[in-house]
Image (cartoon, rainbow, N blue to C red):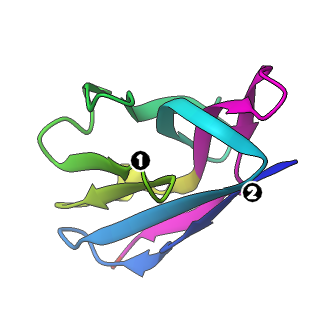
């Protein structure tokens, strides 16, 4: 089995910063893409940012220039540095990883989510 565990969420004032982290563990052979998604109340889950094993990144237009995704391939971790946070960034943030397990099969795994609330 594979587990993804997020940390770093919380309450922050508008204009503030937070750093989310996600660690993958278990029967992992390799991880290709990793990413962050978010879901606000009453809305569908949306992509925030992704990063490939080679470091190629993509961002949602709403966060480009404010958020930075990074990863440590050796540690199977992915981070999301969030700056200049806005109330509309409030959501549950989920980590995702496309994982090749030891059998060779590839699956998409999700973390349990971490709440980010931006409010004064």
Residue 43 placement, left or right of 9: right
Residue shown at 84% from the left, 27% from the top: 103
> Can residue 86 be seen at all in this image of the molecule?
no
**Up/down of 119 relative to 109, above or below:** below
Q: Which residues are magenta?
A: 94-119
Verify whether residue 45 appears in magenta: no
Residue shown at 77% from the left, 21% from the top: 104
Prevailing secondary structure class for the magenta stretch in the rendered image: strand
Verify whether residue 117 appears in magenta: yes
> Can residue 105 be seen at all in this image of the molecule?
yes
- Front residue of 77 and 14: 77
Residue 21 placement, left or right of 107: left
Q: Are marks 2 and 1 in contact (CB under 8 Å)?
A: no
Residue 1, image x and y in percent?
88, 48
Mark 2 vs mark 1: give the one in front.
Answer: 1
Disc 2 secondary structure class: loop
Identify the residue under disc 2.
Answer: 112
Residue 44, image x and y in percent?
65, 29
Identify the residue under disc 1.
Answer: 73
- Front residue of 42 and 106: 106
Looking at the figure, which quarter contains the C terminus? bottom left
Residue 64 placement, left or right of 12: left
Residue shown at 29% from the left, 49% from the top: 70
Dot 2: few (<14), some (14–19), or many (≥20) neighbours within 10 Å? some
- Front residue of 76 and 111: 76
Residue 12, image x and y in percent?
35, 78
Report the Cα–Cα distance between label 2 and label 1. 21 Å
- Front residue of 14 and 97: 97
Residue shown at 56% from the left, 52% from the top: 93
In the rendered structure, which disc, 2 or 1, sits on the residue that comes first in sequence? 1
């Amino acid at each position: 089995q594979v587990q993804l565990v997020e940390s770093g969420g919380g309450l922050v004032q508008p204009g503030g910063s937070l750093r989310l982290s996600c660690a993958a563990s278990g029967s992992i052979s390799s991880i290709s893409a990793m990413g962050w998604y978010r879901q606000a109340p009453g809305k569908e889950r949306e992509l925030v940012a992704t990063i490939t094993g080679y470091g190629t990144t993509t961002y949602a237009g709403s966060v480009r220039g404010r958020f930075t995704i990074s990863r440590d391939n050796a540690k199977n971790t992915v981070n999301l540095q969030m700056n200049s946070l806005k109330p509309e960034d409030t959501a549950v943030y989920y980590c995702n990883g496309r994982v090749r397990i030891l059998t060779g099969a590839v699956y998409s795994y999700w973390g349990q989510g971490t709440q980010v609330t931006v409010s004064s």
